[in-house]
Image (cartoon, coloured by chain):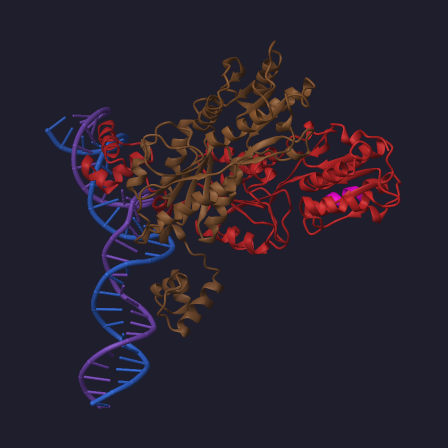
Chain colours: A red, B brown, C purple, D blue
Amino acid sequence: MRDVAALAKVSIKTVSRVVNGESGVSPRLMRRVLAASERLSYQHNLTASNLRRSDGRSATIGVVLEDLANPFASALHRSIEDVAVKRGVLVLAGSSDEDEERERKLVSAFASRRVDGLIIQPSSHDHSYLLAERRARTAIVFVDRPPAFFDADTVLTDNAAGVRRGIRHLLGHGHRRIGYLGDMHTISTAAERHRGYVEELASQRVELDDGLVRLDLRGIEKSEAAATELLRLSHPPTALFTGQNLITIGAFRALRRMGLHRRVALIGFDDILLADLLEPGITVIAQDPAAIGRAAAQVLFRRLDGDRAPSEHQIVLTKLIIRGSGEIAP
Amino acid sequence: MRDVAALAKVSIKTVSRVVNGESGVSPRLMRRVLAASERLSYQHNLTASNLRRSDGRSATIGVVLEDLANPFASALHRSIEDVAVKRGVLVLAGSSDEDEERERKLVSAFASRRVDGLIIQPSSHDHSYLLAERRARTAIVFVDRPPAFFDADTVLTDNAAGVRRGIRHLLGHGHRRIGYLGDMHTISTAAERHRGYVEELASQRVELDDGLVRLDLRGIEKSEAAATELLRLSHPPTALFTGQNLITIGAFRALRRMGLHRRVALIGFDDILLADLLEPGITVIAQDPAAIGRAAAQVLFRRLDGDRAPSEHQIVLTKLIIRGSGEIAP
DNA sequence: TTGTCTTTTGACAACGTTGTCACTTAAAGG
DNA sequence: CCTTTAAGTGACAACGTTGTCAAAAGACAA
C-alpha cells in the first residue's frame, strides 16, 4: 500500500480509502490510485485490515463437521459456502471424526484465526468450553445435533418424527416384527431415532421385542453382521428399519446375500445416491442437508448483523421416499 | 497479551515467548505466565502474529474444487485436510462450479487472506493470473487437471490409460461396437478420456464409428437421453463406456429402463458408492481421490518447507474393478 | 572480592492496515 | 473583496503480535 501511495503520489490513507471504496476521494486521485495498484498488482491484506478495523471482522467462518468426505456433511458444507460467498465470506472447515478433543482443537484453531462465526455439528457432550468464544462475540450455530450445557441457535432434523413416519409405514403394510439397527447411542441423533422407533410401536400398541434391536453399530460391516444375525433368528423380523446411511447399506448387503431382499422389507434413514436403481429400490426417510446448511448459515449471518433475539431452534422436515423395499408385505 | 503480561508481572515479550514455546524462559516465569493466561482465558491471535512474523505464514491453505458436494471433490478435500491438520494448518475451501471467474475470485479471496498455499482443480483455461501469487511465494499445486500457460506441480489421474484399460477389457470380451459417452470436451480430463477411447480402438485396429460417440453431456438426464438414443440405433452398440460418474448413472438408468442391462455391457470411469449392489454390479475404472489429495498436500508442504526443485508431475493410477456389467458378452 | 561469561528479561520498533482529527483547497455567500 | 462552509487529503497513532538488541541477573573461576 505504501508503494502504491508512492507511485500514485498520494498518502497511504487515500489508497486505503480507494481500496475500501470509501466516498470522498476525487475522481482524479481515484484513477491515479487504481492505475498504480494495477501496475504494482497490489493485493489488499485482509489480515492486517482485520487487525486494525474496529469491528474486527475477518470475513471468515469456521465449520466443524463429523467428516467432510461423507455426503451428508459435504452437502451441508456446500450450502453453507453458497450463502457465505454471497457475502464475501470464506469458509474454513474441519472434520471432528466424532472425537471430542478434535472438535475442541478445531474450534480453538478457528478462534486463533478470529473467525466471525462457527457452525458446529457436535461430537462432544459438553459445550461450555465455547463460553470464551461467545464472550468474544463469535456467532455460534449448531447443526444436526443439539449442544450440551450451552445455549445457542440450532438447526436440526425431526429425527424421531421421521422414524415414526417410517415405522408407521411398515406397520401399515402389516408388519408386526420390525427389527431396528442403530448407530452409537451416544450420538444424539441416533438416540432420537431409536426413541422414535420405540414410541411409534408403543403408540400403536405393538409389543417391543428387544431381541430385534441392535444399537451401537458403526459402519457397513458391523451393520451387515448385525442384520445377518437378526435374519437368522428362529423367529426373524419381517421388516428392518435402519437408523443411518451406512447401516442401511450394510443391511441391504445382508438381505441380498441371504436372498431375502424381496421378502423382508427395509426402510432406511437418510437418502443414498443410487438407492432408486437398486433391486428393489430402497425406501428411505430422507433428510435435507442442503436446507439445514442454508438455514444455519442464514441464522449465523443474521446474528453477525446484530440480531440479539433469544436462541432460535429450527427443525428441518424429513421426507418419506417410496421406492419398493419399504412396501414389501410380511 | 498485554493483560496477561500485567497479571503475571512480566513483559509482554516474555508472554510471547511462552506462547510460542521459545526456549530461554525460566520455569518460574513460565508458570506465572501460564497461570495468568489460563485465568484470563487468553486466546493467541494468529492474524496479528502472522502479520508481524518474518516468514509471514498464516498456517492456512486454500483449496479450489469444482464442487465441494461431489464425492470426488469431498474425498480429495478430506485427504488434504488430514495432511494439513497434522501440521497445524487449516483449510479454506471453495467451489468453482466449472466457472473461470469464480475460480479467479476464490483465488483472490484466498490471497487476500494470505494463504500459504493453494491446491486447485482448475476450471479456467489460462492460469497466468497466478503469477502474482507465485511472486508472493505462495505454493501452488494443481490436481485432477493440468494448468494452462503456467508451470506448477501437478497430481493427475492417468485418464487416457485408464480408459484404454477399460476399452481393452470390453474388446477382450468380444465387443466391436463400443459406444462412448463423455463430459464437456473443454474439460481436460474429459478430453483425455475420449482420447484414450480413440487410441485404444485404433491400436487394436477396430474401426471408430463416430455415430457411437456422444460428448458434452452434463449430468444424469443428458446422459440418459444420449444413451437411449445410441441404444435405439438400427445398428446399436453392444457395449457402452461412460467417461464420468453421473454419466455412468444416466447410462445405467437408460439400460434399466429399456431392459438391456443384462444384454449391453457397461464400464464407467470413476467409482460409484453402491455400484456393487446394483444388478448387475457396475464395472468401473476407479480413481483414487484420497491418494490424489494426499499427494497434492504433500508436495505443497514440501514446497513450503523450501523445496525448490523443478515442477513435479505425479500420476495416480486407476484401478479396474470388475463387478459384472463390463463382462457381458455381445 | 572482582571479572567474565552465559542466561534471562524487557524496551522498542515494526508488520500492513484503518480510525481520528487537523489541515488544505475549492465553492458558495455576502 | 473577505468570510463561511464543505469537500478532499494527509499525518499520526493504534490494532496484537514478534524480531532485534541491549540491559540485568546469575553462574563460575580466579
* Stretch in magenta: A193-198
Front in this rendered view, residue B112 or B240: B240
Q: Is residue A107 left or right of residue A227?
A: left
Question: Where, quadrant-wise, is the C terminus of chain A in this rendering?
Answer: top right
Question: Where, quadrant-wise, is the N terminus of chain A in this rendering?
Answer: top left
Front in this rendered view, residue B228 or B262: B262
Q: Residue at x 49, y 43 (%)?
A: B291
Front in this rendered view, residue B297 or A300: B297
Residue A291 belongs to the span the image colors magenta: no
* Residue A34 percent coordinates (x, y): 26, 31
* Residue B134 percent coordinates (x, y): 31, 40
Residue A196 belongs to the span the image colors magenta: yes
Residue B68 shows in the view? yes
* Residue A103 percent coordinates (x, y): 56, 52
Q: Residue at x 63, y 54 (%)?
A: A125
Q: Is residue A140 left or right of residue B84?
A: right
Q: Is residue A176 above or below residue B279?
A: below
